[in-house]
Amino acid sequence: MQICRVVGTVVSTNKVEKLSGMKLLLVRALDLDTFTEIGPLVVSIDTVGAGSGEVVMVVAGSSSRQTPITDGKPVDNSIVAIIDHIDVGGERIFDKAKPAEGD
């Protein structure tokens, strides 16, 4: 599992039938020490109703096909949770209810 931020969307009119109706989002991993985006953009199937800018939990590989929405579908990356807050060592490093400065 990885913590990522939703940074965009992907629209595909023509796709295999098993992907019809699925929302495709672009996510980028977050460095939890600095809370900055790192690494490549990845297309992820949204299984929880995530939106732009949200911090989410993402699974890849066979785990991405373990949700009711993705079971038996040709997916390799799925958003499985919208993060409310993250605590590390007794310190809250992220809180959805309290946007960071500059947001």
Image (tube, grey):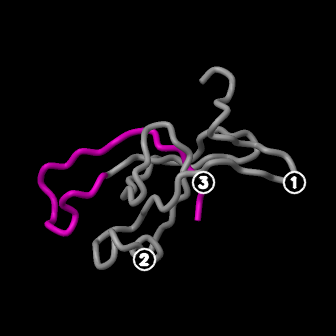
Q: Nearer the viewer, mark 3 or mark 2?
A: 2
Residue labelled with disc 3: 3
Distance in Å between CA atoms under marks 2 and 1: 30 Å
Please tell me which residue is depicted at 39% across the width and 60% down the height of the picture: 47
Between 71 and 14, the one lying in front of the other is: 71
Q: Earlier in the sequence, mark 2 or mark 1?
A: 2
Please tell me which residue is depicted at 33% across the width and 77% down the height of the picture: 71
Which region is colored magenta?
Answer: 1-23
Residue labelled with disc 2: 66
Q: Residues within 10 Å of mark 3 (few under 14, many from 20)?
A: many
Q: Residues within 10 Å of mark 2 (few under 14, many from 20)?
A: some
Q: Is residue 89 left or right of residue 59?
A: right
Q: Secondary structure at mark 1?
A: loop
Amino acid on which the number 1 mark rests in the picture = Gly
For the N terminus, the quadrant is: bottom right
Q: Secondary structure at mark 2?
A: loop
Q: Earlier in the sequence, mark 3 or mark 1?
A: 3
For the C terminus, the quadrant is: top right
